[in-house]
Image (cartoon, rainbow, N blue to C red):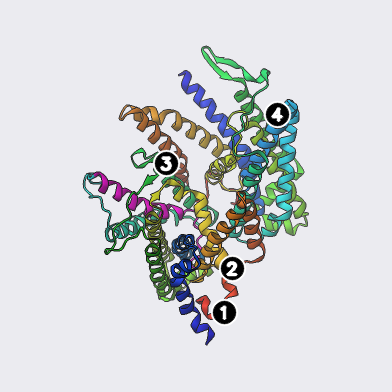
Amino acid sequence: MRDRLLLPLLLAVAVAVPWVAEAFGTPATVGLATRIAIYAIAAASLNLVLGFGGLVSFGHAAYFGLGGYTVGILWEHFRLGEPFLGIIPGSADLLVTFPSALLVGGLAAAAIGALSLRTSGVQFIMITLAFAQMVYFLFVSLAVYGGDDGLMIRRTNAFLGLNLRDPATMYWLSLGVLVVWLWLLGRIVRSRFGRVVEGVRQSERRMAAIGISTYPYKLAAFTISGMGCAAAGALWANYARFVSPDMMHWTKSGELMIMVILGGMGTLLGPVLGSAALVGLEYLLSGLTEHWQFVLGPILVLIVLFARKGLISLLPARGRLRHG
Amino acid sequence: MALLVEQLLNGIQLGVTLFLLAAGLTLVFGIMGVINLAHGSLYMIGAFAAAFVAAETGSVLLALLGGLVAAGLTGMAIEFVVLRRLYARDHLDQVLATFGLILFFNQGMVILFGRQPIFVALPPFLAGAVEILPGVPYPVYRLLIIVLGLLVALGLWFLIQKTRIGALVRAGATHREMVRALGVDIRLLYTLVFGLGALLAGFAGVMAGPVYSVNVGMGEQILILTFVVVVIGGVGSIRGAMFGALLVGIVDTMLRAYVPGLLRTMMDASQADMLGAGLASMGVYLLMALVLLLKPRGLFPAHA
């Protein structure tokens, strides 16, 4: 009984964050919660390939950055009033920029995945890293879009008459996307498709033996996961009103992986917990000392060495939403 | 022509530095199956320690010794405290734990030495240039790096091909289980290999100090290039590491030298420089992707 109430309870607490923050006079909490929700979207997406599929991608920050830059570049062209590549008009409406970000992230992930998935093991880790580095350096070198310094987005996207500059509105939007995305991922994971992806992690050879060609499944999972990261990036661009190549730095890919592990691989809520834990930990430690990474590093090592199952194992069984 | 020769030598110098790092990384991976992201940290620690000792004592030999000892000790500590527990784990755990180590070491260097890059002055007898071809002067120090690097490579080749320890290392890289089954003290072998890799990384760091600046983050910059080298050459293969290192070093240097100039003929100078630098940085990753697509196990795969 207690277990069944867990999810609605968590959701209610999450929805109430802005009001609670106001009541306690800590408005910064809303921004923190927004960051947690956005990273949770990205981490949950990575988890589809990493946790469920067992494919260790070390380059998912690239799709996060591409999603962000889609919003940024469309805004830049909207501001200048000249179409992108001479044909695509700029836009500052989230109803346009968000699907565009999904499209860009999906196409990039499909292209990169199609090539990378020909390898496996350590080579797969390295080739995904290499492609992410290529995308990173591409944006570093694009002077038109700010290069190394990044791109300011002066005005947040319009969205159904809502004001995304209001922290609470931005937070609820991010939370809404997160909830919908988790629900979708849950459906995906429980479908036949999801079971094949899970089967790939357990034993690719067995999958082949029962007559399933795994490549298209892996590629589809990789693409969906890239789209999710791009969605998170698009939200981030609106939250921070700024995009830069740092969004796709390889350490960002590492952070996303840590969130997945920290929360619990191959579980639906794990990445959300992982995101909350890592963003929260960074926030707490950086409040205590400028050298917070000096503390965070060993904590990560300890987690990998001794707490392999992640934070999710602390939750009662039903809340884990694990299958198989 | 003079520029070409100079850039070619610069490429070889970068390649030799990359080889020193790649040799350790590829052996550690080939023999223990561990992906060690903190390998770049050993390079950084070697560079910082040498810069510190050089500034305190002014002695080149002591600086070299300091860098090697610091990197070697750190490497052994990493192996003993963390990596030893990760040999049996999957790559994901290794990546994450060593990622944590990078954060720790980088911030540790910030605490000890600050964020400002340290520039290491060369002693007078190494600071000049010699004429390698008529009309083509080249810095003595960079030549020294090439020579020392090649000597180390030769020494490594001798160690691995001609000694008993080398035979164990080779056997360990290609037939890990068999070596264990034959009763070799595998833990000792692991520690030896890891220590050797740490020393080589530290040596590379010591030598790189005066060429580039010594700063926090130098480890990751070169680490990712080193991974490119290892993957191109074939994981676990020293020969592959040598070949890959020279290839990556030369390609990277050449692209950086010539791409911006090429672009300048098409667009205005500042844009061309920026785009050129970016495209040149992308080059080696493109090369790696190409190699992996054609030969998914690298050019010289160690495991037959």
- Taking depth in this image into account, of A278 and A215 the one nearest to the observer is A278
Discs 4 and 3 lie in a common subunit: no
Q: Which residue is mark 3?
A: A149
Q: Which residue is mark 4?
A: B55
Looking at the image, is mark 2 or mark 1 earlier in the sequence?
A: 2
Q: Residue furthest top?
A: B134
Q: Is residue B268 above or below residue B134?
A: below
Instruction: State the residue in front, B147 or B77.
Output: B77
Mark positioned earlier in the residue sequence (1 or 3): 3
Q: Chain of mark 2?
A: A
- Decide: is B4 above or below B69: above
Query: Can residue A298 be seen in the rendering of this structure?
Result: yes
Q: CA distance from mark 2 to mark 1?
A: 13 Å
Give the residue number, with chain letter if any, for mark 1: A316
Q: Are marks 1 and 4 on the same chain?
A: no
Disc 3 is placed on an element classified as helix
Which of the two marks, 1 or 3, is nearer to us in this view? 3
The local crowd at label 1, few if under 14, some if 14 to 19, many if 20 or more residues have their Cα within 10 Å, is: few
Q: Position of residue B6 (x, y in %)?
A: 51, 22
- Closest to the observer, B168 or A145: A145
Q: Label 2 belongs to which residue?
A: A310
Query: CB atoms at circles 4 and 2 under 8 Å apart?
Result: no
Q: Label 1 is placed on what type of residue?
A: Pro
Q: Position of residue A162 (x, y in %)?
A: 30, 63
Would residue A203 be seen by someone viewing this image from the given angle?
Answer: no
